[in-house]
Image (cartoon, rainbow, N blue to C red):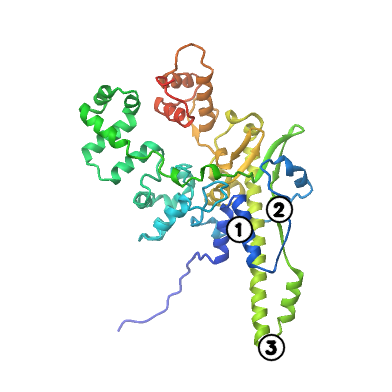
Amino acid sequence: MTGIGLEVSQKQLLKLNTNMLQSLELMTLPISELQHRIERELEENPTLNAEDPAGLSDSYEEYADRQLRNEAHELSYSDSSAYGSDLSDSHQAWLEGTVSREETLQEHLMMQLGCLKLDDATRRCAETIISDLDGSGFFSHPLEQILSPELLKVKDEALEALHSLDPAGIAAEDYRESLCLQARDVGIEEREYAAFRMMVYDALPLMRQGKTKEASQVMGTSVSETECLFSFLKTLTPYPGARFSSGPEQVIIPDLSIKQEDGRLVLRMNDSTLPILSIDAGYQNMAKEYSGASSRDEKEASSYLKKQIASGENLISQLELRRSTLEKVGKVLMQRQKGFFLFGKGSLKPLTLQDVASEIGVHATTVSRITTSKYIDTDFGILSLKSLFSSSVGNSTGEDYSKTAVKEMVRKIIEENTTGKKLSDQKISDMLKDKGISCARRTVGKYRAELGLDSSFER
């Protein structure tokens, strides 16, 4: 007879309650959407009081002086299991600052993802990737920067799931990979796919110039096959996420400002566009009076008031946490990107989400959420917070160069060219190499395209 015994084991489980999920949502909301969210809470919760906000303004200068009188206290902040997890909120908003509530790309993808049968790790990986996609549907950052070692193990499975969703071509590095994913999605044959991929990566500039014969030689296909593939390419979209953009309805309000004042950099948070919330003292006293009630009606009133007061206090706490986390990220950016705030994009240093996360003691996904759809007012204009993060480019000088800084070098080389001849991508690559920066011809072409600059032929 087999013996029966008891075994005690310890497991760490993560459970997200309603309050935690609400906190994740508030982390990602830009100010314009946060305003609407607070207004809705005020309508639904009578125990909440709100002092009138200072008023909307696209310019930070109009409320900077007021903010000097309202420097906020810092909250102690530790990255709890809820915030440190790789779970992403289904209401993640990449539609920066928009007033209307049209369906966002993240919402569209999350809804479909919920219908797929995936294991927990693969689902969390896919959700994290979705939360970091830009407006075109492409990666905002290398996956190694936003995924934990655990989730990197299931990266391929997560990408396979994402590539099965609508719109086809999302979760790609750039428009080239997106076009190839879309070609796969419609079931193009293997031989044709190989030629199509070669067209996209190697022969597209020739096709744009009408050099079909030369492109055919590069691709190893006949002229008629090349023309057929090019016609097929024209049916695809290079930026599959673009149809979710709000276009002219976009309104941008900065969440914080870092500017030079009297020879030093100053960080200020934009709180004047949001009301100051508090719990109504009258309702608090009423709840205390009903706490020892015996009648049914009074007990129901007591339960209702306690629930509403707790909900209001939770919202106030979450808003403070959002502000505190954003301020900590801003302080790290002011320190680590000091050159940028003083001299502009050409001085932007390599900086990853993980770098900032490690410095403030949270997970990289927390930094990703708090910087999503957020803007910063600088002496060089209002920019997205995400634009202050950039990967490193190889060099032989010992000095770190960010991708953004190298792109600015490419721009300057092209704009300051006075030779009378148009510079090819290879020539620009050689000029960067002379500066000790290793940047391949194809990479120069990619940076040039991202800058909106035509090729030497088109220029």
Residue 74 lies, with reference to residue 331, above or below; the image says: below
Q: Which residue is mark 3?
A: 294
**Which secondary structure, mark 1?**
helix
Residue 145 lies, with reference to residue 444, above or below; the image says: below
Q: Residues within 10 Å of mark 3 (few under 14, many from 20)?
A: few
Image quadrant occupied by the C terminus: top left
Q: Which residue is mark 1?
A: 37
Residue 389 lies, with reference to residue 441, above or below; the image says: below
Q: Is residue 234 left or right of residue 345?
A: left
Q: CA distance from mark 3 to mark 2?
A: 42 Å
Asked whether residue 288 appears in the rendered view, the answer is yes
Coordinates of residue 331 in the picture (x, y in percent): 66, 43
Coordinates of residue 398 in the picture (x, y in percent): 53, 27
Q: CA distance from mark 2 to mark 1?
A: 23 Å
Q: Tell me which amino acid carries mark 3.
A: Ser
Q: Which residue is mark 2?
A: 74
**Which secondary structure, mark 2?**
loop
Asked whether residue 128 appears in the rendered view, the answer is no
Coordinates of residue 420 in the picture (x, y in percent): 48, 11
